[in-house]
Image (tube, rainbow, N blue to C red):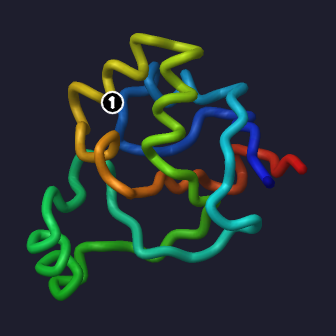
Amino acid sequence: MASIRITSTPPGEAPPAIREAWVGLELPLFHENPRYYLAWGVLTGPRSVLEGILKFFAFRFQFQRGFAVSSQLAIEILERSNADAGRWWRENVPRMVRSRGYFLFAPECCERME
C-alpha cells in the first residue's frame, strides 16, 4: 500500500502547532497519486450532508490538488505520535474522526513512499 511522509507543515485551518504535529508521520493513501478534489476547510466546511449540498450549489468550495488520506486513520496515527494534537481533532472537529472523510495533503508538504 502506498503512503506519504509529511515533510513540512501542511497548510490548513487547524492551529500551527496542530498542523506541525503531522511532520514526520507516514500516512496510507486513498489513491496512489495526487488528484484534484472538491475541498473545504476543516473548520469552515459543511457539518452535514445538507450543508454540503448547499455549499456546493453556492460554490463555497475549491478544487485542490493533493494526496487523500482517511481522516479517521490519520488521526489515529497522529494520536500515537502526539496525544495533544489528536485530542484537538477529537474536540474541535469530531466529524473528521467519525466520518468517512478524507484529509487532503498538499503535494509540496509530503513525499510519496512505496
User: For the residue labelled by badge 1, is the local secondary structure a helix, a strand or a loop?
Assistant: helix
100 vs 12, nearest the viewer: 100
Query: Residue at 51% across / 13% down in the picture?
Result: 82
Q: Toward which corner of the image does residue 18 lie, by quadrant?
A: top left
- Give the residue furthest to the right: 114
Q: Is residue 112 above or below residue 97?
A: below
Q: Is residue 63 above or below residue 4?
A: below
Could you tell me residue 25's position as x and y percent?
A: 68, 29
Q: Residues within 10 Å of mark 1 (few under 14, many from 20)?
A: many
Could you tell me residue 62's position as x and y percent?
A: 39, 73
Could you tell me residue 93's position as x and y percent?
A: 25, 38
Give left or right: position of 97 versus 50.
right
39 vs 83, nearest the viewer: 83
Count the marks.
Answer: 1
Q: Is residue 106 above or below residue 76?
A: below
Give left or right: position of 30 versus 71.
right
Give left or right: position of 6 versus 80.
right
Query: Residue at 23% across / 74% down in the picture?
Result: 60
Indicate the amino acid at tag 1: Trp
Could you tell me residue 24's position as x and y percent?
A: 72, 26
- Give the residue furthest to the bottom: 57
Query: Residue at 86% across / 47% down in the picture?
Result: 113
Give left or right: position of 39 versus 20.
left
Query: Residue at 41% across / 22% down in the picture?
Result: 86
Q: Is residue 29 above or below residue 24?
A: below
Residue corresponding to mark 1: 89
